[in-house]
Amino acid sequence: MAETNKTATLTIDGQSYELPILSPTAGPDVIDIRKLYAQAGVFTYDPGFTSTASTDSTITFIDGGKGELLHRGYPIDQLAGQSNYLEVCYALLYGDLPSKAQMDDFEARVTNHTMLHEQMVNFFRGFRRDAHPMAIMVGVVGAMSAFYHDSTDISDPWQREVASIRLIAKMPTIAAWAYKYSIGQPFVYPRNDLDYASNFLRMCFSVPAEDYVPDPILSKAMDRIFTLHADHEQNASTSTVRLASSSGANPFACIAAGIACLWGPAHGGANQACLEMLREIGTVDRIPEFIARAKDKEDPFRLMGFGHRVYKNFDPRAKVMKQSADEVLDLLGVENNPVLQVAKELEKAALADPYFADKKLFPNVDFYSGIILEAMGFPTSMFTPIFALSRTVGWISQWKEQLDDPQLKIGRPRQLYKGETLRDYVPIDKR
């Protein structure tokens, strides 16, 4: 981000202050207010930081108006349609797509670090059997700092690299084991002869009595889910990772913080909320009723999985995810699953209705990913853990970038205080 010749003038009580305007390579200009408090003695007020740039970054760019999502400059539809998750991981981590030799080396490093420390099995067993998989993931990822002491020194570039590979490699195993533990089945160990997505599916659905051989269509769909959720700029969980990192916390603590934030239903639970809505609709014949409710301004009901807070046109991830959803449903069928029957008919009804087209309420990535995961046999409790697994590389990329930033300071948001002013303490017998 470069300083321009433009400035913004702020006048307070007749005193004017010139604020530099910074220009990015893409997106709106940014008013630099770093010296405003020192010069004018005032803060800015921006609840939710929706109009505030907290950092500069070279990783991901979103243009919600155009429906554009770029990772290192590469459009997400090209990455999801032609690349694969580990190649996207490489680009996010290192800034560019890899050569064949670089990709082979990176894939080998990830594949050879998928095992968990055997003593971590006992850590899993410390949770109650009915623990939510996300609760397990938060605890286990945070505990990795107790098992991998040789990759917690953030001042050592090599240790940062080792931690990055370990987290990307081991997160599928952690997520799969959290699922297995929650349903009372034995853990399934990873296999080095399988690709990243197939390995995850096998660890989730194989049992000692019967192996699970992932269908290539399902593996491809899972890989796309990973790819389409890999990073999404400075969202709540990414900002949480960066804020934790600014204090000097170790990488495992930072990623655990990101997982905890993602667990919030307003952030990582969108595809779960979509499936719950489909179950509420129940049967195909009730779709017109719920379409009418969604149009009624007096009714609080809204269609989950349609439209997006950031994308005001269309979700660029949805087109590729729809293709995978169609392939998965063709493979597995929807005849015996009323939820999937409702999903397919709701999609048709909404896309054919001018009301939703006019308001740009198109099916988004959460709608299609929820359908795919439901068809594969995942319970809704696993939707957010899979999101966390996918987003790990984005969190790590942002974490690494921040540690290399010479402007790094510990995060310290300000506030607009509206409480009591100074008053004297009153002894309890006089109150």
Image (cartoon, rainbow, N blue to C red):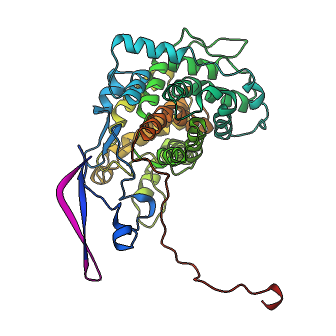
Q: Position of residue 351 (x, y in %)?
A: 33, 43
Please state the extent of the stretch shown in magenta in the rendering: 3-15
Count of marks, rendered view: 0
In the rendered view, would you say 188 is above or below 138? above
**Would residue 377 be seen by someone viewing this image from the given angle?**
no
Q: Residue at x 41, y 62 (%)?
A: 296
Q: Is residue 58 visible?
A: yes
420 left or right of 239 in image:
right
Main secondary structure found in the magenta portion? strand
Front residue of 113 and 136: 113
Which quadrant holds residue 260? top right
Extreme-top residue of the structure: 193
Residue at the (67%, 31%) spot, across then down: 178
Q: Is 285 rendered above or below residue 7?
A: above
How far across and how far down the image is residue 15, in percent?
26, 79
Q: Quadrant of residue 95?
A: top left
Q: Residue at 48% of width from left, 37% of height from top?
A: 395
Q: Nearer the viewer, residue 116 or 150?
A: 150
Is residue 61 or residue 365 the one in the foreground?
Answer: 61
Of all residues, the one furthest to the left in this rendering is: 5
Q: Quadrant of the C terminus?
A: bottom right
- In reply to whether residue 296 is colored magenta, the answer given is no
Residue 227: horizontal and vertical position, in percent?
Answer: 42, 29
Q: Is residue 170 left or right of residue 197?
A: right
Taking the view exactly as shown, the residue that stands out farthest to the bottom is 430
Q: Is residue 9 magenta?
A: yes
On screen, 21 above or below 196? below
Q: Judge whether 401 appears above or below 27 on screen.
A: above
